[in-house]
Image: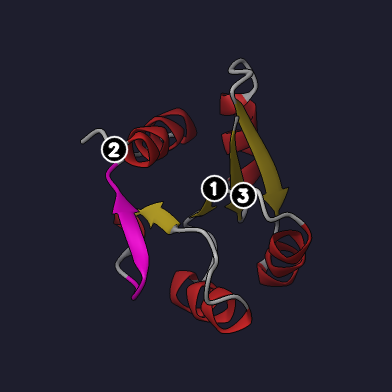
Amino acid sequence: MITILAVGADAFAIAEAAAPDPAVEVLVSRDAEEALEKLARNRRIDAVLITEAVDIAGLAREIREEDPGAPPLYAPASSGSAPGVRALAAGSPEELLGALLRALSGET
């Protein structure tokens, strides 16, 4: 089972895209505060996917300050770069989820 924390307005669409796959669980957070709470409560999160509607650099900084051992952070490449955040070249929620799953499995 791969567990992803999706943060931002598109988080629910990411969860919907993952619904047919029983090997993927997507937890949803609307903002930084909720994301930090879920990270603190759930140590089995494999990756954090930050959607475009969130201050990516600010959220990444907050996560690293709260939990230096947090899972890897990902965001759409179209949202710009931020330190410590890996860019995913994808557009739709389905493409974004697919790109993230490939990145986690080591595929390019």
Mark 2 vs mark 1: which is more N-terminal? Answer: 1
Residues at circles 2 and 3 in contact by the CB criterion of under 8 Å: no
Q: Residues within 10 Å of mark 3 (few under 14, many from 20)?
A: many
Mark toward the start of the polypeptide (2 vs 3)? 3
Query: Residue 66 appears at what percent x and percent y?
Result: 63, 80
- Judged from the image, the secondary structure of the residue bearing numbered disc 3 is loop
Q: Which mark is residue 106?
A: 2
Q: Which residue position holds label 3?
A: 45
Q: Which residues are magenta?
A: 82-89
Q: Which numbered dot is residue 77?
A: none
Instruction: Give yes or no for contact between labels 1 and 3 (Cβ–Cβ under 8 Å).
Output: yes
Crowd tier of the residue under label 2, counting other residues whose Cα lies within 10 Å: few below 14, some 14–19, many 20 or above: few
Verify CB contact (< 8 Å) between mark 2 and mark 1: no
Q: Quadrant of the C terminus?
A: top left
- Taking 7 as reference, is 103 left or right? left
Q: Amino acid at mark 3?
A: Ile
Residue 48 image offset from top left, x and y in percent = 53, 54
> Residue 46 got which mark?
1
Q: Judging from the image, what secondary structure is the residue with disc 2 in?
A: loop
Which residue is situated farthest in the bottom direction here?
A: 65
Query: Does the magenta segment cover residue 63?
Result: no
Name which residue type carries label 2. Gly
